[in-house]
Image (cartoon, helix red, strand yellow):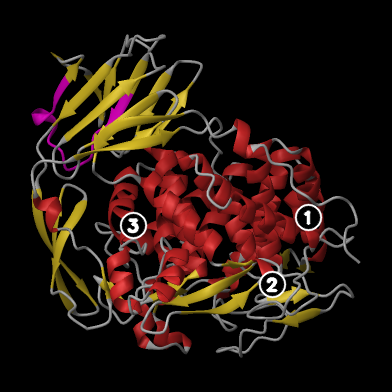
Amino acid sequence: MKDQRQHRVKTQHDYDSRGEPYTATVPDTLDLAEHARLAINALTGHLEPERHYAVYQSFTFDKEPKLGGLTWNLPAKDARVLPLLRAMTGSAQNLDIERGLMDALLAQIGEDGLAYSPISDGGAPQGTAYPFANGLLALAMLNWHERDGDLACLVRFLRLTTALARIAIHVEDRAYWPPESSYRPDGSWAWTTRGTAKIPYQPPEEPYLEQQGTEGCVKYEQAAPLRALVARYRLDGDPEALEVARRVMRFMLKPGMWEDTGDAGYAGNEHGIFAGHFHGNVTALHALLEMAVATDDSALKQFAREGYEHARRTGIARMGWFPGWLQPTAHHREAGLFLASETCGVADMLVLAVKLTDAGLGDYWDDVDAIARNHLVAQQITDVDQMRALGGGTPEKDALLERLHGGFNQQMEGALDSTGPHLWGCCTANGAVGLYYAWHGIMRFDAASRTATVNLLLNRAAPWLDMDSYLPYEGKVVLRNKQAASVLVRIPYWVAHGKVKCFLNDREVRPAWAGNRLRFDRLRAAAGERPGSVIRIEFPVPAATERHTVQGKEHILMFRGSTLVDLSPRDTTPSRYCYYLRDEMKRCQASTKTVERCIAARIIGLQ
């Protein structure tokens, strides 16, 4: 029996949190907010309102465009990220669909606090509660509460996290949720409808190996509910949430969940060494790092950092490319999965880099910059002309193409610069999360000291500062102050410090260096019609050609600063969507455009 209380979500988003729109002339360069607008289109477009707002996991835009793979495993991902994208953009597109999505999710919450799937297509069987999806729903509730101030979301969050803790299976000092399995109201567990296990698994037995199951990522299945319990502990210090979280952490750190590196003289489960599903393993590192920060566990923090460094060296961090699987043939998978770079994994690496940096475990902003400028946005399907050419170009087909325009894909068949004509529901949600983390990290503001900290030289409008970036065409950024008394600007590693020139209100100045940051003090804030101080920073943008080998094949990559502007060899396979068509970025002058900006009144914190 479902929760009979009113489940309609209260949202004031459309009339008090969008901020005031204004027009601005800006450089026509990478703007993550514009990519977020397109992601909103795809996220609300791949939902099926007539089927409880289930998500179409796949969309093929070839000569016969079609949607497929309807699943209720994914809607909570969309519900979690849409408020973040609204904060980036101020967009109200399809806000009614967003509300309907959350209403549909909440309508499935039973008297025990868990959300039960209303369909059996492509995931949890009808009438069962999938712990991973419930964990994501709990995180979504926190974002909705932070955006709209609705206390009912917090009440539901408390009930849901209590229920997740209750259904975890305890073994000795550990606990786990059976992977790819869902909970029945009678306490038994059901296997997913998605297919047979590559390495056998029978719920609810304790998994002994990370790669068991259909997807082959046991730790991933623990990550979302664990993150929900950690968030509960941060919120109210609940001792049961902490106790179960500690048990789940111990399960995730078992030797079988990591690679056996004993022959190399060290234990893989003590250093974050993994193989198998890349996205699944890096998602697990997110959860473990959040646990480490919440409990101030220094050893676990170091573990997460080592796991990131291990993941980083398996790809090409300079362009933000990472593999889909590590050592797939050793775990009963096809060899080609190594080259199937998922947006999910690419975005995961960006998010983990931000989390590690914010936790004080290093400075990974250059990694964030490279991922955001390159493979993250490259794998978002934004070129309507290419979509139309691959999809047939007729009006009836164009309507479906437009509905999914802005989704993210999974690179297939090994080429670094192209993919088949496909979009994926999971990649669209996870890629959008990556956009938000990068956008949030561009700049932060400390109200007490009135200090703005700029980490990434990307375009962003904020209540305290607007930044216009001319990269990669020109080594120039312009910061228009609104509220700050001081501004700290991080300069990328590829910029020669001795060649940086700084101007304050068009007067050349020599600000102090603090490591790789420039510090500007005693700035004038905007007041009424009077503009604030304007900072301009100029520097050369070096061109670089690098060689990177992936599975024995050499790739030549050409960069301007952090931006990949060309590569070879190029994939010339017909009927594929091409990335990195960036010849215009080789020019040395950026064009400008007039845009409408809308600064959100509330910026949602990072989970």
Q: Callout 3: few (<14), some (14-19), or many (20+) C-alpha neighbours within 10 Å?
A: many
Q: Of the numbered discs in the image, which one, if any, rests on residue 51?
A: 2
Cβ atoms at labels 1 and 2 below 8 Å apart: no
Residue 302 lies left or right of residue 146; in this view the side is left
> Dot 1 lies on which element?
helix
Which sits earlier in the primary sequence, circle 3 or circle 2? Answer: 2
Task: Reply yes or no: does residue 489 show up in magenta.
Answer: yes
Q: Residue at x 46, y 61 (%)?
A: 271
Front residue of this view, candidates 185 and 105? 105
Q: Quadrant of residue 488?
A: top left
Cβ atoms at labels 1 and 3 below 8 Å apart: no
Residue located beneath label 1 in the image: 160
Query: Which span of residues is magenta-colored?
Result: 488-502
Q: Quadrant of the N terminus?
A: bottom right
Where does residue 14 sit, x and y in percent of width and height?
61, 38
Task: Reply yes or no: does residue 134 show up in magenta.
Answer: no
The three-letter amino acid code for the residue at tag 1 is Leu
Q: Is residue 208 above or below residue 44?
A: below
Residue 278 seen in the figure = no
Cβ atoms at labels 3 and 2 below 8 Å apart: no
Instruction: Single out the mark in the foreground, 3 or 2.
Output: 2
Residue located beneath label 3 in the image: 377
